[in-house]
Amino acid sequence: MRRLLLTRLLWAIPVVAVVVIVNFLLTRLVPGDPLVAIVGEYPVTPEYLAEIRHNLQLDQPLAIQLVSYLWAVMRGDLGFSFVNQQTVLSLVLQRAQASLLLLGPALLLATIVGLLFARISIARRGSGRVLLSAIVLFGFSVPVFWLGQMLIVLFAVKLHWLPAQGMASMRGVHGALATGWDFFLHWIMPGFTVGVFHVAVIARVAQASLRDAMSQDFVITARAKGISERAIFWRHILPNALLPVITVIGYNFGAALTGTIMVESVFAWPGLGTLLLNSITNRDYPVVQGIFLLSGSIIVLVNIATDLIYGFIDPRIRSGYSGGR
Amino acid sequence: MAWISGGFVVLLCMVAVLAPLLLSPDAPFQISNSVLLAPSAGHWFGTDDLGRDVLLQVIWGTRISLIVGIVSALAAGIIGLVVGAISGYCGGLADAMIMRTTEIFQVMPIFVLAALIVAMAGAGETRIIAVIAGLSWPQTARVVRSEVLRIKGLGYAEAARCLGISEFRILVFEIIPNAVGPVIAVSTLTAAFAILLEAALSFFGLTSSDTISWGSTLSTGQRLLYTAWWLSVFPGTLIFLTALAFNMFGDCVREALDPRSE
């Protein structure tokens, strides 16, 4: 287990390094001299320009600039957002909470619904296959931001059933229960929109893994022992079929976060996505970079966590034993 | 299924090609006093906040979406084919390096990175195509690599080797032509992905304001969601149907190539 943890952590280092270096190099992409952006059209003396250039280390070679950038990132200094009057780090961390609040329950529900669809599609062979491929095609093809818009038009603008935007009511509500209900009402539409892609991903993998687990010898053994079909499914088939599902959720976490980011901007959910949209509009680039850095790091962490959970659940992987079947 | 989805793509291509021949290039940009009209006989898809006809915008937008989708899928396919072939055929250090690189790409939040690049470097169709292709080739590379590894050990590759044909010729004339099927399947999926990504970028206001695409009309629709549903419904439906058609076609190709699916 320790070796697994170590190799995964070693794998994470180059990934995070690439994210940070890409982030640094992108600042060089912005057309024009950064000094022009600072002093603008104002006529300044060359000495003053040289002084700013020196203070900002712009006269240093690229490698030195990179090192001091890396050092700043390691200290958690991602810059300052003048638009939000806040450091970038505290801003993105704060918004990431709202994003995870949207994504977490959506992923959980999508897992359950995806497994359910997989189960149904196996039970009804012919029509089940059609249902499954319809779900998968829909999930992979629908632009989530558009799906969000359609839900708003239908359920908020036309029917007035659900609040269109935000994470909580403007008026504010009192009491824990009322706050929870208010959050839930705001969560339904964005949560559904985020979940659609994952239902597709999970249903497809779960169908294959359920079918695979069902044809294993231990199922025949269990049946021969006279265990009820229900108990066979819950105790023997499902736990074995869950492993690939967990993996696919973990490895698709990047897509999940990206989907959340797109959906948020439609529903004005106060998370990373809305922040990204606003920062792009305001040309608040340090924030955009911060979002990229943070989401990249979260994804890497989730990938490592996935491997560890996988190793924890399946002893074969933990001990490095890969033979058997 | 293959015929329906393929036919839809062909129809879209015809719209994209015929649009500049039948319409004047200014038509979709033509502003008028008839602002935010709901769909009617005069304006089938309604008009936007500047009085521009949404149907014309959608027709015109087909060009951008298809060009971005197809060209970036082609570019990603070619890059992936070359890189994957090198990785699979050479093996060793080159293979390990390339595979680690594709792994890094797989965990990156592609959309955020694309948004960052386009926001900083500036919009423009060529740039967007380059960004999408540059971020989506690893998928193809992985598929090509596994195909090359499989074919490399097959009888006819061995036979060619016995005939004394050079390794490079075997790779180019024996192995790659036989690996093309899965590449086509992956590339159609990449095209769908590229169309969705382009739409997302223009939805976020990252494409230049003087081009009209489905995503940019959707972006206007987001501002006017409460008053003008038609700005969102029609372009969005087309993005959805186009991505669906490419995905379906890709699935059909994959199934046709997979002997187990019978």
Image (cartoon, coloured by chain):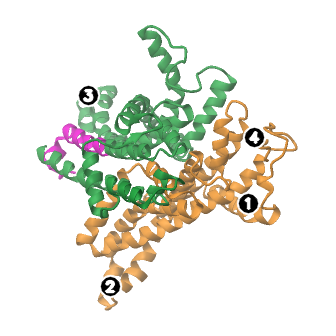
- Disc 1 versus disc 2: nearer the observer: 1
Question: Do tag 3 and tag 4 residues touch (Cβ < 8 Å)?
Answer: no
Circle on res. B49:
4
Image height check: is B63 above or below A232? below
Circle on res. A226:
3
Image height check: is A197 above or below A34? above
Q: Amino acid at mark 3?
A: Gly
Task: Based on the picture, tell me whether residue A319 belongs to the magenta stretch.
Answer: yes
Q: Amino acid at mark 2?
A: Glu
Q: Residues within 10 Å of mark 3 (few under 14, many from 20)?
A: few
Give residue A255's position: percent from left, percent from top: 43, 45
Q: Colour of chain B?
A: orange
Instruction: Give how far apart the Cα atoms at labels 3 and 4 are.
Output: 69 Å
Q: Amino acid at mark 1?
A: Val
Specify the chain shown as green.
A
**Predominant SS along the magenta part:** helix
Can residue B163 be seen here? The reply is yes
Instruction: Give how far apart the Cα atoms at labels 4 and 1 are.
Output: 25 Å
Circle on res. B167:
2
Circle 1 residue:
B15
Please report the bounds of the magenta region as a residue range: A300-325
Task: Based on the picture, tell me whether residue A317 belongs to the magenta stretch.
Answer: yes
Left or right: residue A223 compared with residue B181: left
